[in-house]
Image (tube, rainbow, N blue to C red):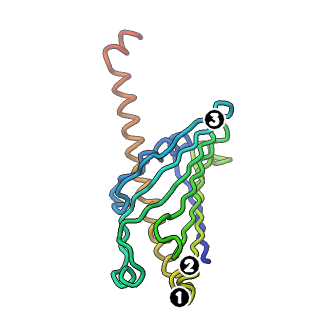
Amino acid sequence: MKLFKSVHEFNYEWSLVSAANWQKYPNENCPHVRHVDVLNRWVDPETGILTTERLITVEQNVPSLIRKILGGGTTQYVREISIIEPKDKILTMKSINLTMNNLLSVEETIVYREHPEHKQKTQFTQQAAITAGSLVSRWGNVIEEFSLKRFQQNAAVGREGFNKVLERFVVMAEAQHHQSAGSPTTNVAK
């Protein structure tokens, strides 16, 4: 098993980051993400906690030699469960690959939480456990190491892509604010 952990700060408040998260895909930095489908969504009426289950379809650039040996195609599926705790200002996302997870399992946990000292920032923690299955135990360490390096590269690209999404989200929110502030109905109401 190989472990990955990354900690980052976004210079945006938690409410903006958690809202922009739903607009993360598609983005030009992550063209491998083809579809994101919501399978289930529910709100706990007592706590206000929102839980969402999604299926993410990705196109992976799997080397043809590995595809020939192990079978399968380039289309992969990932199940994600996200939990938004609005009172505590925490968004937790847990995902696991569904495709070929008997050969290689990647369990990822992402947490966005309001920064304890800077309310205008959001702490981001990303962790992953990468485990080769028993069918490939002879090559397990090599496969895990290769997958860890690829995961690290994709994580950096994903963070950069999400930063661009956040920047666009802020611009759109400001434009909507200015548009509503200058609209005739708003001016009449003043």
- N-term-proximal mark, 1 vs 3: 3
Q: Secondary structure at mark 3?
A: loop
Would you call the spot at circle 1 few (<14 residues within 10 Å), some (14-19), or many (20 or more)?
few
Q: Quadrant of the C terminus?
A: top left
The residue sitting at 52% across, 40% down in the picture is 41
Extreme residue in the bottom direction: 138
Closer-to-camera residue (189/56): 56
Amino acid found under the numbered disc labelled 1? Trp
Gap between marks 2 and 1, in whole Å?
A: 8 Å
Q: Secondary structure at mark 2?
A: strand
Q: Secondary structure at mark 1?
A: helix
Q: Is residue 141 above or below residue 27?
A: below
Gap between marks 1 and 3, in whole Å?
A: 45 Å
User: Residue 92: x and y, percent?
Assistant: 60, 51
Would you call the spot at circle 3 few (<14 residues within 10 Å), some (14-19), or many (20 or more)?
few
- N-term-proximal mark, 3 vs 2: 3
**Label 3: which residue?**
44
Amino acid found under the numbered disc labelled 3? Asp
The residue sitting at 56% across, 59% down in the picture is 8
Closer-to-camera residue (167/98): 98
Question: Do the numbered discs 1 and 3 sit on residues whose CB atoms are within 8 Å?
Answer: no
User: Residue 32: x and y, percent?
Assistant: 36, 63
User: Residue 71: x and y, percent?
Assistant: 39, 78
Gap between marks 3 and 2, in whole Å?
A: 36 Å
Q: Is residue 160 above or below residue 62?
A: above
Closer-to-camera residue (185/29): 29
Answer with left or right where residue 110 lies relative to residue 70: right
Q: For residue 134, what is the image quadrant?
A: bottom right
Instruction: Give the numbered dot on residue 139.
Output: 1
**Label 2: which residue?**
132
